Amino acid sequence: MSKAILECRDLTKHFDEGPAQVQVLKSVNFTLNKGEFAAIIGNSGSGKTTLLHMLSGLDVPSSGQVLINGEDFSSLSDKQRGVVRNRHIGFVYQFHHLLPEFSALENVAMPLMLRKGSIADVKRQAGEMLERVGLGHRIQHKPSELSGGERQRVAIARALVTQPSCVMADEPTGNLDVHTAHEIQMLMHELNRSLETSFLIVTHDLGLARQVDRVVKMEDGHLMEADKSALERLGDIIAG
């Protein structure tokens, strides 16, 4: 039986807008297993990114639980969740969110710096991960000196350098041209297979959604399994 890396139980999230309450997530249940590559699809505004932020601990649910490796971390303090994220979760944004004044090597090293290990060891690990994503020759370049695809590779290296249990990505190819998006897709799949790291992505990219192990769909705050063979018929949803 596969080991559950990430799990949520009866997860809800609501926001107050004046006198009204907007329910974004409605009793969501989900499990991601070790080494699994899963995608979340759905209309814009359906709750995909909100769910990803709940699962990664970037935000807290209104009710319900999020578990990483069987341990509940949704009720922890901000500082405690930060420690759990640093140990178990990598995150890739649509817009890479690299620090412009630092080199590729320094950006990738940032999560390791929080662990206060030796500088030499941190730089070695960051350099090795940049080599892994094909950027060993660009380690001293700043983000402004890199292409869009290279910046996203740096962001992926940063997410993986801590050897997390799971990498979450919010539209990781959404800001890239078709050729570069395909290269990033192939890279994520290669890293998923070779490192056995679980991936959970939010995407509107039909090509990427077709290639994953499992697809789930957000619709009006609810999460449900999606039939991969029916993805062509879901074009209107994915393009939303």
Image: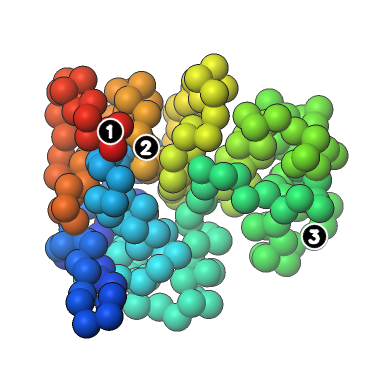
* CA neighbours of label 1 inside 10 A, class few (<14), some (14 to 19), many (20+): many
Q: Residue 228, how many percent across, how many down?
A: 20, 25
Task: Check the image and report above or below for 127 versus 6.
Answer: above
Q: Which residue is mark 3?
A: 118
| Amino acid carrying mark 1 in the image | Ile
Q: Earlier in the sequence, mark 1 or mark 3?
A: 3
Q: Which of the numbered marks, if any, corresponds to residue 238? A: 1
Name the residue: 15% across, 39% down.
225
Name the residue: 29% across, 41% down.
40
Residue located farthest toward the front when viewing the structure as drawn: 18
Q: Which residue is mark 2?
A: 203
Q: Quadrant of the C terminus?
A: top left
Q: Regarding mark 1 in the picture, which secondary structure is present there?
A: helix
Q: Assess whether mark 2 and mark 1 are in contact (beta carbons under 8 angstroms).
A: yes
| Amino acid carrying mark 3 in the image | Ser
Q: Residue 214, how many percent across, how many down?
A: 25, 33
| Amino acid carrying mark 2 in the image | Thr
Quadrant of res 179: top right
Is 42 positioned to the left or the right of 27 in the image? Answer: right
Which is closer to the viewer, label 1 or label 2? 1
